[in-house]
Amino acid sequence: MTINNFKINQRILFSSLIVFILFFTISHSYAQQNGVLFTNVNVFDGVSESVYENLNVLVVGNKIHSIGENELTVPDDLTVTKIAGDGRTLMPGLIDAHVHLTFGSLSMQELMDPELTPQVAALKAASGATEMLMRGFTSVRDVGGPIFELKQAIDGGQVSGPRIWPSGATISQTAGHGDFRLPTERSRRFFGQASRAEMMGATFIADGRDEVLTAVRENLRFGASQIKLMAGGGTTSAYDPIDVTQYTLDEMRAAVEAAEDWGTYVAVHAYTPRAVKRAIEAGVKVIEHGQLLDEETLQMMVENDVWLSLQVLRASTPDMDPLRVMKRQPVIENQPLVWQTAIDTGVNLAWGTDFLFEPDLNRLQNEYIVLLEEWLTPAQALKLVTSENARLLALSGLRSPYQGKLGIIEEGALADLLLVNGNPVENLELITDPEYNFLIIMKDGKIYKNNID
């Protein structure tokens, strides 16, 4: 045998070995497929006004494989866990479109404590994320704060928690809603020292087109699925009155251009018509809050296909700072009118909680859905917090960290599911007691809670 022939035969043998290993690995993996079969469940699919009765739903891997009234055909190579629904309701996992997993897990006193470290904040956020999943929230959109490491830990299986669409650090002008500097901290631009909040990944203070571009690109570099920009005053910030408009049109356009180059969008914090109109002109796709909007501005949002991510806020809590209570008053007073007008005009509507600096509020997350009954039927409220919120998440396009359909029960959709003890379409109050009424909590085809006897 010549040396060349030997080399040829060696390459053939090596190639054959690789093919054999790949075939064995794929075959072995396929042979080990697991599935979950829900039998005799009533299905709220996330879209309809009622439930579909007496169905069977088969989950294979992380997707819904098949749905039917009759006995489903189960693949021969599938190991199936059967769950008897006994007429209970199977529905999509809940989605909160406006959370701050880190800021929502810390009080203001903890946040201002000089001894607070990123590690301590991360541990509190991780605990909060696990509790959120146990309340039935399988997906959330985190719109500002340190989040990338927690998301990575959840996706890697080190921490139990919902899917996260991260924004990363908020982007704010000097004296804007995201300017979290202490009175002793001077401007980075003039004095060269980044603030503590910036160092912790809470915010970027960015002025001028160039700095805004850099801030947006920094968040995208770390995996942001959308960008959060502060376009107006807020209630939790010390320096800016709620009526002020923030960022020039050119600065805001810079953020939009940078986000669009990555196939995603900018969401802005804004309450007033003036701030929102500027954001629309700049090409912003989502308005967060908007409780001071008028019908004209909401109609402009409809015409430009801009989303309104709205909350149902309450006036105050025992631990709320008096300044914050005062700043929230006009927001609270105008809130019912904005909700009704937004529904009447047909604006693309999403829902979130936006709990900040009051960790005790988190346990009320489900109860805040029930507050929607002031304007919506139980079915409409459930649709909003499942399939409609999922449509908002889909705006991230290829920057979405999880590809596939969410918020809906249909063949091929991702298997984020809740088995509810009762029918929440008839009685929305059922979702306020997830510990008792959410018997199964499934995310990505994996069961995280099973209370079926």
Image (cartoon, rainbow, N blue to C red):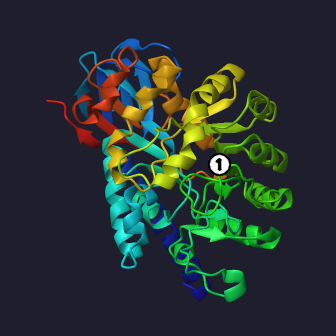
* Furthest residue toward left: 453
Look at the picture and state if 425 lies above or below 350. above
Look at the picture and state if 445 lies above or below 431. below
- Residue depicted at 65% across the width and 48% down the height: 396
- Residue depicted at 50% across the width and 64% down the height: 148
- Could you say which is closer to the camera, residue 326 or residue 259? 326
- Could you say which is closer to the camera, residue 167 or residue 359? 359
Q: Amino acid at mark 1?
A: Ser
Find residue 386 and report its horizontal and vertical position in percent. 49, 32
Look at the picture and state if 115 lies above or below 157. below
- Could you say which is closer to the camera, residue 201 or residue 323? 323
Find residue 290 and report its horizontal and vertical position in percent. 65, 40
Q: Quadrant of residue 404?
A: top right
Quadrant (top left, top right, bottom left, bottom right) of the N terminus: bottom right
SS at mark 1 in the image: helix
Residue wearing tag 1? 396
